[in-house]
Amino acid sequence: NKLSLPDDEATSSLLSAYDSLSTFPDVGPALEALTKTPSITPVVFSNGTQQMVGNSVHHSPDLSPYSKVFHDIITIEEVKKFKPHPDVYHHLASKVGKSKEQMNEMWLVSGNPFDIVGAKAMGMKTCWVDRAGSGWTDGLIGGKAGAPDLIVKGLNEVVEGVKKAT
């Protein structure tokens, strides 16, 4: 029962493919809208490594034209823990100049329910991108306490939704 890992060339090829993934059609216009909304400071917040996420943001054909929209790329690498560990969210707050007591001044936007649940548990405001239109069904934390603050069908709805909710 041995685990074999791909060789360096295969790994490099896989990571290169990751860097050139296509985005959903609404990503570009949503990022454009952010450039016109100085009240929102967008950052990338990921469980990936700085190198992996940075390469995607700066080299993906679809995403790289918008890389300057992001004020920072914040990963869990320094913390050495993964979302939804509380230390990761505290690290995010620190990187954007907020204290632990100001978590409710930050929004996390994601299509992943685990991201939403973790951020909500830390007191952040959350926006869930429900591309399938199936509604919020995660029951880890029941009721309003576990539900996103905002549900949108696409990124094109995020900026206006956040502005209205703030």
Image (tube, rainbow, N blue to C red):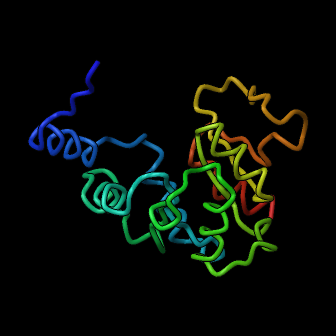
Residue in view at x 21 percent, y 39 percent? 14
Q: Residue furthest left?
A: 9
Residue 137: % across, % down:
75, 26
Q: Which picture quadrant has residue 113? A: top right
Quadrant containing the N terminus is top left
57 on left or right of 149:
left
Question: Residue 163, percent across and down?
Answer: 73, 63
| Position of residue 147 measured from the top left corner of the image (x, y, whole percent) | 81, 40
Name which residue lies at 9% across and 41% down. Answer: 9
Residue 156 drawn at (x, y percent) = 57, 48
In terms of depth relative to the viewer, which is nearer, 105 or 117? Answer: 117
**Side (left or right) of 146 relative to 17:** right
Which picture quadrant has residue 37? bottom right
Residue 71 vs 53, above or below: the answer is below
Which quadrant would the C terminus be assigned to in this image? bottom right
Q: Is residue 57 left or right of residue 147?
A: left
Which residue is more in the foreground, 136 or 65?
A: 136
Q: Residue at x 66, y 26 (%)?
A: 133
Quarter of image, res 2: top left
